Image (cartoon, grey):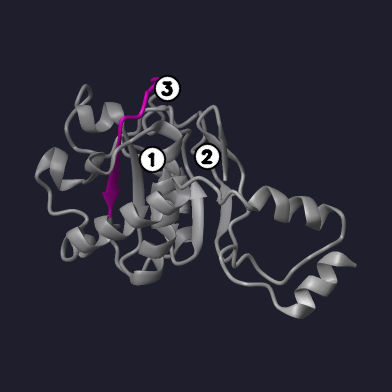
Amino acid sequence: MKIENGLITKFDIEGIKFAQDLITLTNKLARSGLYMKPTSITLHNPASAGATAQNLTNYIDSYKGYKSWHLTIVDNKVFQELSFTEVAWHAGDGYNGPGNRTSIALEIGEDEVSERTAKVFIAYLMKEYNIPITNVVPHKHWSGKNCPAYTLQHWDKYIKEIEEYYLELIKPPHWAEKHKLSLESKGIKINDTRYEDFMTRGEVFALLN
């Protein structure tokens, strides 16, 4: 994943379908036009259970009011609705509220697949904007609203899963990876990584050849 100026410009994570469907600039209520330096990430669940990602992105695109968020995530489908550096109206804490003014908002479907998909984006956003896991919070944190109602039922477990994924994401590559990539560029491929395993005789022959 690559993020530039608050927009995802490259996405190649297998199993996830990503697209941009930015809320139009003519929607002056949903689009704040205010710059934001994100320091937190806020998780929401949609009010309408069973809504698809397409349903939700269509809804927020056409909604004429002070409501918006940055990512719609349902099942394995994701839409970016706003730049991550633009204030969205989602936290319920007012025009100058820290939830609205500092946090990236994710609208996440109420099921395990949606949460697995969201975990990927949360970890990448944490890495991109140097956001600690303690600043990944529920909507309830800002306004007291019981949201995300589905995720709050297993919040601690989900936060732990996000943190584990994030730590894997930022882990430095194995020292041998550069050699593996160099060999592959020369047309020599040896099965999988297994950096600490012994080589088979067949793999030795292949390498020497």
3D distance between C-alphas at marks 3 and 2: 13 Å
Looking at the rendering, in which quadrant would you find the C terminus?
A: bottom right
Q: Which residue is mark 3?
A: 33
* Magenta stretch holds residue 128: no
Crowding at mark 1 (Cα within 10 Å: few <14, some 14-19, many 20+): many
Instruction: Please state if 91 lies on the left or on the right of 50 as rendered.
Output: left
* Residue pointed to by mark 1: 126
Q: Give the amino acid type for the residue marked by disc 2 in the picture.
A: Leu
Residue at screen point 63% across, 54% down: 12
User: How far across and down, in percent of the image, does residue 8 sit?
Assistant: 56, 40
What span is colored magenta in the figure?
Answer: 33-44
Q: Earlier in the sequence, mark 3 or mark 2?
A: 2
- List the single residue furthest toward the left: 144
Mark 3 or mark 1, whichever is nearer to me:
1
In the rendered view, would you say 76 is above or below 78?
A: below
The residue that label 2 is drawn on is 22
Q: Nearer the viewer, residue 125 or 192?
A: 192
- State yes or no: residue 39 in magenta: yes
Tell me the amino acid under the disc marked 3: Gly
Which circle, 2 or 1, is nearer the viewer? 1
Q: Secondary structure at mark 3?
A: loop
Residue 62 seen by the camera? no
At horizontal 57% and vertical 46% (from top left) the residue drawn is 1
Label 3 with label 2: CB-CB less than 8 Å: no
Tell me: 6 left or right of 133: right
The kind of residue on which mark 1 rests is Met
Q: Secondary structure beneath disc 1?
A: helix
